[in-house]
Image (spheres, rainbow, N blue to C red):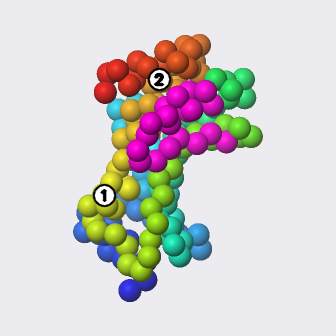
């Protein structure tokens, strides 16, 4: 069974709604959170299983340096995954990668891959919005989110 078939079987067992994109070897999922809506792309390459959680905000050009600082502060000490900011177009996302040899990992690991990125994006969304729209310093916005968790 291919890795795409293995992952699709996992999604069916978990009863998650998805779209399969065979051309990009990916699955597309959508989730709603407390602070936004999120699109997740799960890509399956030969040796890596990756989750990219797109956040529902494009960072305006004038806020990208401040958000880059917020991303660096949020990422420091993270054990699983990281935030990424595309300085060219303002795309903000959460990324997790899991090395894969042979078959995909257990359902418990796949659960974490699918859900941790969504949880982290939703947890930090208020901080990013506060920096973009509230002119909150990155240090204060990230500290507030991390204190309340």
Asked whether disc 1 touches disc 2, contact meaning CB atoms under 8 Å apart, the reply is: no
Which residue is depicted at the point 68% across and 26% down? 65
Decide: is 101 above or below 112.
Answer: below
Residue 8 locus on image (x, y percent): 37, 72
The boundaries of the magenta stretch are 68-86
| 65 in magenta | no
Decide: is 62 above or below 83.
Answer: above
Q: Residue 123 versus residue 35: which sits nearer the camera?
A: 123
| 84 in magenta | yes
Residue 134 locus on image (x, y percent): 55, 14
Residue 15 seen in this snapshot: no
**Residue 51 falls left or right of residue 9:** right
Name of the residue lying farthest toward the bottom: 1
N-terminal label among 1 and 2 = 1
Q: Which residue is mark 1?
A: 111
Judged by depth in the image, the label closer to the viewer, 1 or 2, is 2
| Distance between the alpha carbons at the discs numbered 1 and 2 | 26 Å
Q: Which residue is mark 2?
A: 142
**Residue 5 falls left or right of residue 12:** right
Which residue is depicted at the point 32% across and 21% down? 148
Q: Residue 3 versus residue 101: which sits nearer the camera?
A: 101
């Amino acid at each position: 069974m291919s890795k795409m078939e293995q992952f699709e079987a996992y999604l069916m067992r978990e009863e998650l709604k998805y779209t399969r994109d065979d051309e990009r070897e990916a699955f597309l999922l959508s989730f709603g959170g407390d602070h936004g809506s999120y699109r997740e792309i799960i890509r399956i390459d030969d040796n890596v299983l990756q989750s990219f959680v797109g956040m529902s905000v494009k960072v305006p050009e004038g806020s990208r340096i401040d958000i880059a600082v917020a991303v660096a502060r949020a990422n420091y000490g993270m054990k699983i995954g990281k935030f990424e900011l595309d300085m060219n177009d303002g795309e903000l996302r959460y990324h997790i990668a899991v090395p894969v040899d042979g078959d995909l990992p257990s359902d418990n690991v796949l659960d974490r891959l699918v859900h941790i990125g969504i949880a982290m994006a939703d947890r930090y969304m208020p901080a990013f919005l506060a920096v973009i729209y509230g002119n909150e310093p990155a240090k204060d916005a990230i500290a507030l989110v991390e204190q309340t968790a």
